[in-house]
Amino acid sequence: MVKIGTVELPDFPLLLAPMEDISDPPFRELCKAYGADLMYTEFVSSDGLIRDAIKSLKKFDFSEEERPLGIQIFGHDIETMKQATAMAEKAKPDLIDINFGCPVRKLVKKGAGAALLSDIPKMVMIASEVVKSTHLPVTIKTRLGWDETNKPIVEIAERMQDVGIKAITIHGRTRAQMYTGKADWTLIGKVKENPRMFIPVFGNGDIDSPRKALEMKNNYNVDGIMVGRACIGNPWIFKEIKFFLQNNEIINVSLKEKLDICKKHILKSVAWKSERTAIAEMRKHYSHYFKGLYDFKKLRVKLMMASSLNSVLEVINEIESKYA
């Protein structure tokens, strides 16, 4: 068993990464059904919560079936982060997570996300104040460091633990790398091997197959792994990883099951948000749902061009009649 404060998880838990316009309630429900052990909301701006509460508060929506679940917040101002923590706590999640790793320019420009990797004292202060302002366990997600010459993750992990952080997830890239190149798990392993560390250490980066999950488990002794981009349009990856870890065998999800999952996804999305928004955001998933189908280009274009729920379902039915 892995414990994050009072939150109990199974041995070697699988975590769903917080991803903007991806990790919403409809997608989380599917990931949970296929074996995700801990999930996070889309990351929520502390500034956005204070200025535009209604829009940002919608990201706090979750169902009881999704538990255990963490709300992830980000920001650069200590007082605003404390206020955001209080607002998040009212939604009654199981934990609060701080985003110290998002590399996108709009966050970094504001001094949030991975920007704080270049100001570790402030990073530590924010973590400390968030921990003091809530009774919930607080975790963080971060990166190795700012760039190739600045990768202080071993020190960061120790200091985070010292101020009360209950678990750390580390993406094996620097901010400068963004999402390019290969994730380096060596330093993640060094954090886990550090005799001073006693909180759970989760690894993230390039986990795109059951074999890669087993490799990282065996080579770096992490307490669990977080899956990000590889689960987009592929929520069953959690089931595949768990089966492989237990049986050393690959299971194949049938096209019929993938089509059923895709239909559930679009229907849940339309029910949770507007039809127009749901259809636009689902386009990020289609290529992955139907990866590997031969002679698929025309149907893929048709699916991407579909502008209503009925037209999307018609194309999915067409795919089913041709391939399933």
Image: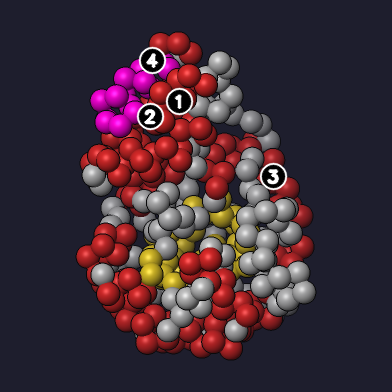
Residue 1: mark in rendering: none
Where disc 1 sits, the SS reads helix
Mark 1 vs mark 2, CA separation in Å: 6 Å
Do callouts 3 and 1 mark residues in contact (Cβ within 8 Å)?
Answer: no
**x%, y% of residue 224?**
60, 57
Q: Which residues are magenta?
A: 306-320
Sequence-wise, the earlier of marks 4 and 1 is 1
Residue 318: mark in rendering: 4
Do callouts 4 and 1 mark residues in contact (Cβ within 8 Å)?
Answer: no
Q: Is residue 158 above or below residue 235?
A: below
Overall secondary structure of the magenta section: helix
Give the residue at x 34% y 28%: 306
**Which residue has dot 3 on it?**
212
Nearer to us: label 2 or label 3: 2
Q: Is residue 275 above or below residue 129?
A: above
**x%, y% of residue 216?**
71, 52
Sequence-wise, the earlier of marks 2 and 3 is 3
Tell me which amino acid carries mark 2.
Answer: Met
The answer to which image quadrant residue 312 occupies is top left
Where disc 4 sits, the SS reads helix
Residue 301: mark in rendering: 1
Nearer to us: label 3 or label 1: 1
Q: Is residue 85 left or right of residue 274?
A: right
On whether residue 62 falls in the magenta region, the answer is: no
**Which residue has dot 2 on it?**
305
Nearer to us: label 4 or label 1: 1
Sequence-wise, the earlier of marks 4 and 3 is 3
